[in-house]
Image: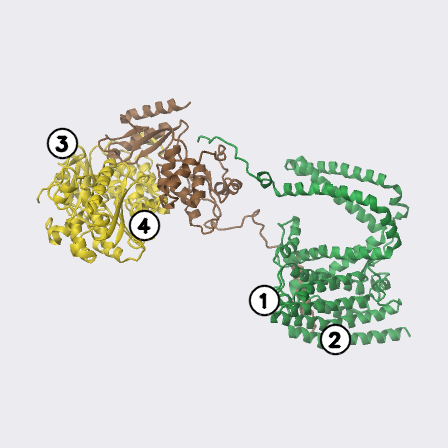
Amino acid sequence: MSFVPGLGIAKGMALTMRRFFAPKATVQYPETPADVAVRFRGRLQLLYDELGNVKCETCFQCAQACPVECIDMGGFDTRGRFHIHWGAAEQYAERRQGSALRRSGRPVPDQEYTHFGAIDLAPVDAILQKYDFEKTEMLAILESIQGVYGYLPVAALKRVSDVSGAPYALIYGTATYYRHLRFEQAGHVVAVCRCTACLVAGGSRVARTIARELGTEIGRGPAASGVSLEQIPAHPHGAHSPLVTLDGKTQQLSQSGAAAWARALAGRTVA
Amino acid sequence: MSPANILPTPGRFPRLLLPVATLGGPTPPARPTDLDAAVAVGAFSSLRKAIDDLRAEGVLNALTESGMRGRGRGGLPIGEKWRACARAAGDAHYVVVNAYQSDPAVLTDRVLLQNNPYAVIEGAAIAAFAIGAAEVIVAVRVEATEAIKVLETAIAAAERAGYIGPNVLNSGIEIHFSVRPMQGSYMLGEETVLLKGLEGKRGQPEQQPPHTTTRGLFGQPTLIHGPQTFAAVPTILAGGIAGFLETDPRTFAGTVLVQISGAVTTPGIAEIPFGATLHEILDVAGGVPAPRKFKAMLVGGPSGAILPAEALSVAFDHESLATAGAQVGSGSVVVLDQSTCVVDLAAVLTRFCADEACGKTIPCRIGLRRLAEIGARICEGQPRGDEITRLTDLSADVAASALCDHERKATLSMLSVVRYFRDELDAHIVRNACPAGICHPKADARAGAVS
Amino acid sequence: MRAIPIRPVLAYPGQFWGRRSLVERLAMILIPAAMVAAVVTAVVLYLAIPPLLDFLGANFPLIRFFIAATAILVLTIPTAFVLIYLELKVIARMNLRVGPNRVGPWGIAMSLMPGLKVLSKEDFTPTGADATVFTLAPVVTFLASVMTLLVIPFAPGVVGLDLNIGLLYFFAMGGLTVLGLLMAGWSSFNKYSLLGGLRSAAQIISYEIPLTLSVVGVIILASTKTAQTLSLNHIVLAQSGSALDWFVFKQPLAFLIFFIAATAEANRTPFDMTEADSEIVAGFATEYSGMRFGFFFFAEYVNVFIVSALAATIFFGGWNAPFNWPWPVNLNAFQPLSYGPAVWFAVAAMVVLVGTYFLAMVVRLLGGRSWDAGSALVMGAIVIFVIVGGVVTLAGFIALDWVRGIVWFMAKTYAFVITFVWMRATLPRVRVDQLMGFAWKWLLPASLVNLFVTATAVLILNR
């Protein structure tokens, strides 16, 4: 309690005037990133493991779960099979090209990405009609679409979503999960069987050799040679082990002959 | 043990061996889709008995008293499962026959459907009646073309005769059957994943509880079993509980179809009672033919364990196998001889499981991949110092945090190698040598191979 | 990965417009409109200018008043924006923050945001409210504040209307704001608005008496120097000379009372609980939204400017410089208007073009390769305009007394404005009963004492 009236006010105002010239405590984010602990988990970025593989599976479950549909994803899936963007509207997806991947700090690698091409959509409408626009028949619808076009064109999937009202995330999540659905035309397909009988008979070695010669991996999409390596889902009864097929036809291969055969195949199909 | 051949036509499938119990009748019909022949040996009599005499409550009681257990997922008593599903509230109940066998080499479910479809149909119809379901969905692999044809013919015949359809046995009850060929993922053999696939969604498993009996297909109470379970139900109801138990007093769990393959004289499918030892199973298949020698047995398919000769006395049922570190799985027993490297096999099986994982949970998605990498490093001669400790710790973590059985059981193969084949493992790690001559750790290490 | 072949997307109606950016759209609308408007205006002007000039010549005072009033009305909005910006940044800096710095350069566009915000809100009249009075209340408040600017002298010769009763007019207009507040509170059909309006009215009325009484002392002082003592222009003239002639040194107590009372008049902290941000109900303005609330909002900021201006005028010498510096430069020989427009245009163009190019090169040199040619030229143009503007202002400052006057007046006024903002950043709020008590029990007696002492002193010293 001071005896001079107004002294308190004067002291207070002097303090604020001093503060006016004092250095400011504001951190200018995002030019200056905040100083956080090493284990801080709130980073807005995709994480990579120590081998450089991005951990996001692009399984779209986050987008599907989001109640306001505010998650937009794009980029390669971890198997490197395709590069696709989804968004609430076409322009939105285009504006946010390379959204998830780019915000992680990596440059978007795909120079070949082009706006998806237009296709004849009448078969898609016919298929949807046949399944009565039922979202629960999505697997059958996608299989039928693949039956017509040979793969799943992006335009067809957008059409399915627009007409049936199924969210993109549902369609995309289903389409990326099942191995028999693909997003591009299949070239030559070498399939190896990895059932227990074939594995015991040395199928794993054969598969690894073929993978190395072709330059790709199982389920990873076509290599530069245009040949893709897939897995036979079920060992047909009566077939011998280890089982290797080319475009569905069984090949008679020994462990030693597999490398030469694969090399020849890769060389033959490279243009 | 009375031999009775219910699974005929040797030569066309893996050689079929003498089964030890009856499933649906003493002699199988010559043509599996011949409804009259099947009815003559008792098909659909249990259904009639269930609808007319026992009613839903009687069926549930009969099953509970029989103590009958399911063939998958730890062999839980099916009476309680059916009762829980019957009691659960919902707009519609469903019965799903999970004949999608994810193991690529095993044919047991397919063979059962091809040779005795009416047993499965009748069992599923009884289930639908007991829980109040109007829809039965049979999910099969799309590759099982013969089984699908037979099943569809059988369903059509049964519908024409009035055993299923809009008016079952003139009782006013509706039971509709549909066959769904599925493909595209190894994980579809898991209950909740199959239901997701039937709903057209991404096949990722769900947390249980809530169990499928409370919330399953489309969120409604769903009863889902394998075809072998459904095929056993008419026998239980027909012969009475006592009749079923008399088949084998050793166990109360009934029989199971097992596919024996690998280094045996007569590989094939056998019907064995729960509780038979692995040694007996090996004998049923004729044992290992000379000059090959028995080395190990892969019990449980790709997510099974590799058991040594000392484990041949283990009984083939859920508890005993779990104690030994294995699982029943799809009923696959692969016999390995000296030409197989168990370490390489375990590594490759783990890699297979990692590739087939759906990716929903992190321990499975990343943990199994790490386990596969550990296996690959060991086989290629570049192990790090503490591989075995890391392996066991990681496997424990993955199994403890598992959402579904795929994750839980995928760790079994490598853990069994650590447990039973330690010396072979050490040879790989310490001496960079493969006793079986399959892996070339020294050469690979020199060549700098990476998996 | 194989590339998917490109096929052009089919056009749909509205595709061209939809793909334009905002700038392109504005350009596409405004440039043709501006061209048409220019042509039309030229024609109209050509036809209408001679009679217009005659009319203007005949009625010059009226025209002057009209222009002054329009200028005042128009300039209140930028003033409000400047004040809002000052408030945001100065308080932020005193709080060790930086304040808005993203929205425009140094955040200046942020102060536009409240304006745009109130424009975009729904403008409704509550059910049961007296629609006429409800609509007129913000108008009255705003106009009452703005009309007082008519008599404030910004510079010698630059005053809206040199009334000889300017100060009385000023306080009369200030009192009209009470009317506006009461209209707002009463017509809202909301008991809380009514109570809030009554409280605001009570506050303003209570503080008007000390305010006016403290100024009377100044009037008495000014009467020693001039006859028209209520004219603000003459009060400023009475303080001409040096800073020591300013009335603040002769009437310190009056200044203090005036300042405190003015803070309460303007509803500023520490006397702002009727309309403060942290009060739950917005007092008389509870039922107002949209532009009507915007008017109250702007009226408040204009009020701050007004009381600052009045303090500067009455106590601190208005447009007088603190000291008269001897100008070594005699620019009277420099008669710019005699050279004719052609010469000026040529000089201006040369300066701008050469300056732009030269400065662009400087920018490029200093900034390195990060400046591309276009940006460097733009920067050069901006800098040359800033330089030319500065030079012209400086020349005006040196040569023209009215430029000098405006500069000094604005400097003093904004010093007070910043003091108000400073107080807002520092002081806690006073309770309404404390506020009223303070006015009636302390300020009123103090202003009476001041009046008494001043009158006595003037009487004695001028005997």
**Towards the viewer: C136 or C185:** C136
The chain carrying label 1 is: C
In this image, A2 relative to A161: left or right?
right
Query: Is C166 drawn above or below residue C118 in the view shown?
Result: below
Label 1 secondary element:
loop
Residue named by callout 4: B217
Tags 1 and 4 on a common chain? no
**Figure quadrant of residue C249:** bottom right
Residue A167 image position (x, y, % from top left): 43, 46
Q: Secondary structure at mark 3?
A: loop
Mark 1 surroundings: few (<14), some (14-19) or many (≥20) residues within 10 A: few
Q: Which residue is disc 1 drawn over?
A: C280
Q: Is residue A72 left or right of residue B426?
A: right
Q: Amino acid at mark 4?
A: Leu
Q: Residues within 10 Å of mark 3 (few under 14, many from 20)?
A: few
Under circle 2, the secondary element is helix
Q: Colour of chain A?
A: brown
The x, y position of residue C439, in whole percent, is 71, 74
Q: Amino acid at mark 3?
A: Ala
Mark 4 or 3, closer to the camera: 4
Q: Which chain is yellow?
A: B
Say few, some or many: other residues with alpha carbon within 10 Å of mark 4 (under 14 / 14 to 19 / 20 or more).
many
Q: Which residue is mark 2?
A: C444
The label shown at residue B290 is: 3
Image point 74% across, 43% down: which residue?
Answer: C37
Q: Earlier in the sequence, mark 4 or mark 3?
A: 4
> What is the CA distance from the residue labelled 3 to the residue labelled 1?
94 Å
Instruction: Write down the chain letter for disc 2.
Output: C
Chain C palette colour? green
